[in-house]
Image: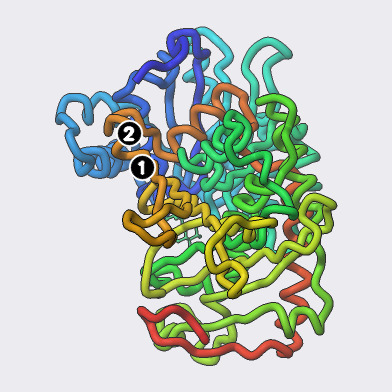
Amino acid sequence: MEFERPNERKPTILIMFGATGDLATRKLIPALFHLFRKKALPPLFQVVGFSRSFLTDEAFRGMVSEIASRLPGSQPEEVRTFSQLFAYQAGRFEEVEAYQSLARRLGLVDKEWRTCANKLFHLSVPPRYYPDILARLSDSGLTKPCSDKEGWTRVIVEKPFGKDLKSAQELDALLGKLFREEQVYRIDHYLGKETAQNVLVFRFSNRLFEDSWHRDSVESIAIQLFETEGVESRGEFYDGVGALRDVGQNHVLQLLALFTMEHPGSFDAVAIRRARAAALKALSLLTESEAVSRTARGQYEGYRSITGVDPRSQTETYFRITGALALPKWQGVPIFLEGGKRLAEAKVEVTMTFSHPSPCLCPRAEAGEHYKNVLRYQIQPHESVKASFWVKKPGVKLELEERDLAFDYKHAFPEGSFLDAYEKLILDAIEGDQTLFVSTEEIMASWKFIDSIITAWQKDVVPLTAYAPGSIGPS
Ligand code: BG6
C-alpha cells in the first residue's frame, strides 16, 4: 500500500493513557504494528505508555511484543524492532510526580532527536479520570506546543464522550481550557471503517442513487447494529452505560448522519463535519409519550449474573427507536434505529427502502402488489452494497421477480489494501485531518436526542423486556 510522503512526517511521540487496557491491547498496538510494517509511521516515532500498573520499559515492551507476535505474518525481527519504539511511565492519573517524570522523559527524547517532537495524547481511560489527567498535563506544561511551527500537541479522546448532554458539555469545557477545537480528536471508530468512509463516495461520486435520495422516493431508512457477543468482561463499565449510550449515541447516529446529510460541497473536513452535524441537529427529540410509542428496550437473559453487573440491573442491552428528521428532504420518512448484544446475527447494515414507483408500469400493481427497491449497505461483517430490483422472469407470462445487483469490497480489492479503522484514525490524527473525528456540534446534537429518550426510560414508562440470548431481541 502506498502512503503519501511518510518520510516527511515530523518526529512524533504518542502518549498512551491506559496503555495496558483493553483498547490498547486489542486495537491500538495492533494498528500501530500494521502501520509500522507498512512504513507509514514518521521516521522518528515513539510511544510512551502511561498506566497505573507498575511495569518497567522492558516488561511493557515484552507485552507489546507478545501482542505483535500473535498478529498474522509477523516476523520476530520486526516485532523486536517495533517493540523498541515503546517506553513506559507508571503512575496514578492524579499523581503530580508521574507527570513530572513523563515530562522529563519526553524532554530527553526531544534532546536525543534534537527537535521539539509533536505530542499526541491518547486518552483511553474511564472518563472519570479525564479531569485529573487534563489538569496534571496542563500543570506539567506538556500540552503547550513548542511554537506555531514546531511541536504541535493534539489529544485523541475515546468514547464514551460524556454520559449525557450535560457531562459532554463539561468535558468539552475542560478540554477547551487546554486545547483548541483543531487539536481535539474525538473518536468514533465507525467513521474510520472503510465501508463508512465509502458512504460519501457512494452517494456523491455516483449519480445513480443520489437523485432519489429524499422523501419522494425513500419510504424508510433502517440502521441496525447487531452483535452476537455479549458484555463479557466489561460488566462494570457497561452496566453504567447501556446499549443506547454505548453504540446508539455514536456509531448508529454517525451512520445516520452519513446517509442523510446534505452534499458537503467538498471533501474538506470542516464542510463534512458541518453537514454531519446539521443532520444530527435535525433529529426530532422524543416527548415522553413518543418515547412510549416509538422506543423499546430489552435486556438479554443472564446479563445480570455477569461480574460487575448489578443483580437487579435495569440497563438495556438492546434498543429500538423510530425516529424522524425535521428536514424538508426527510419529512415523514421513518428512521428505524436498532442495536443490541447477544442477538441471533452479527451485522451492521443500513437499509434504504425506496417506495413503489408512481405511476407504476408493473403487473398486478392494481391488485395492491408493491414494487419497491431496497438498498442494503452492509458495513460489516460483509462489506458490501446490494440493491434489489425487479426483473421479468423468463417465459411467456409477464411476471416479475426481485433480484440483486451486488458489490463486495473484499472480492473487489486485494486483501492488503484495507486499513483497519484505528490505523486510519491514528494516521489522520498525526496528519491533522479531523474529517473522521466527531466535532463538538455533532456530539452535543446526538446527546440531545439520546437524552430525550433516556429521560423517559428513567421514569420507567418504557418496559425493559427480557430476551433470550441468540434471539432477534424483544418482540
Ligand atoms: C464499541 C462498544 O464502541 O463498539 C462495544 O463499546 C461494541 O460495546 C463495539 O461491541 C462494536 O464495534 P465493532 O467495530 O466491533 O463493530
The picture places residue 289, in percent across and down from the top left corner, at: 81, 84
CB within 8 Å, label 1 to label 2: yes
Q: Amino acid at mark 2?
A: Ala
Location of mark 2 (residue): 412
Vertical placement of residue 6 versus 383, above or below: above
Q: Residue at x 36, y 48 (%)?
A: 25
- Quarter of the figure with residue 70: top left
Give the residue pinned by disc 1. 408
Instruction: From the top left corner, tell me how far across and down residue 433 is, in percent.
Output: 62, 26
Question: Mark 1 vs ligand 1: CB under 8 Å?
Answer: no
Depth order, front residue of 184/434: 434
Q: Is residue 122 above or below residue 249?
A: above
Q: Secondary structure at mark 1?
A: strand
* Colour logic: rainbow
Is residue 234 in sight in this rendering? yes
Secondary structure at numbered mark 2 = helix
Residue 442 is situated, as x and y percent measured from the top left of the image, at 74, 48
Nearer to me, 87 or 434:
434
Residue 40 at x, y percent in the picture? 40, 20
